[in-house]
Image (spheres, rainbow, N blue to C red):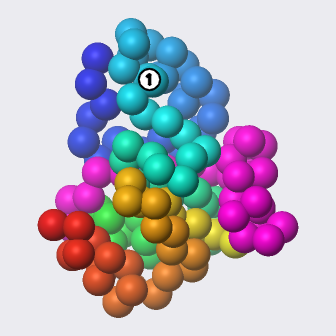
Amino acid sequence: MEVPKNHVLRDWYFQSVFLDNLNGASENLELYTLNPVKITLYGVDWCIDCRRARKIFSEAAVDYVDIDIDKDQKAAEFVQKQNHGNRSVPTIVFPDGTILVEPDRDTLLKKINSMK
C-alpha cells in the first residue's frame, strides 16, 4: 500500500493503524528521526505558524507527514530534544537532515525551492 501524496497524518491512533496496514512499507516511513524519508512537520492543530506551514506545503504540492505532538508523546519528546527542552512548533525535519523551527513564509519557501 502506498502512502497517498500530500497525505496528512495528524492523529497518533490513525498513524498507528495506517502504518500498521502498509504491509511492510512502514519501515520506509521512519518517524522521530533527523533523516526522515519524507519531510516531517511536528506541530499542533491550534498553532497559527503550523497552519501556515501546512498551507505552504499544500500550495506547493509538497509531500509531507504531519504529526500532532499534542496527540503523540513520542513526537513531543522528539521535538523537545531538538529544541533544548522546548515544545517549539512547527519543527520541520527534512530528508537532508536540516531542521526549520518556526520558520517564516520566505524561509520555508526558500527551503522548499532548494529541494526541487
Residue 84 quadrant: bottom right
Dot 1: what SS?
A: helix
Q: Which residue matches tag 1?
A: 26
Residue at position x 35%, y 89% in the image: 106
**The residue under label 1 is which amino acid type?**
Ser
Q: Is residue 38 visible?
A: yes
State which quarter of the image contains the C terminus. bottom left
Q: Farthest top residue?
A: 23
Residue 44 quadrant: bottom right
Q: From the viewer's side, name the closer residue of 88 and 45.
A: 88
Residue 43 magenta-drawn?
A: no
Residue at position x 43%, y 33% in the image: 29
Q: From the viewer's side, name the closer residue of 99 and 65.
A: 99
Q: Position of residue 78 (x, y in %)?
A: 71, 52
State which quarter of the image contains the N terminus. top left
- Side (left or right) of 107 relative to 49: left
Q: Is residue 102 above or below residue 22?
A: below
Q: Position of residue 13 (x, y in %)?
A: 63, 28
- Side (left or right) of 28 relative to 84: left
- Side (left or right) of 59 relative to 25: left
Q: Is residue 49 visible?
A: no
Count of numbered labels shown in the rendering? 1
Q: Position of residue 27 (x, y in %)?
A: 45, 24
| Dot 1 crowding, Cα within 10 Å, few <14, some 14–19, many 20+ | some
Q: Farthest right residue?
A: 85
Residue at position x 60%, y 60% in the image: 43
Q: Position of residue 103 (x, y in %)?
A: 49, 82
* Magenta extent: 59-87
Q: Is residue 90 above or below residue 65?
A: below
- Side (left or right) of 16 relative to 73: left
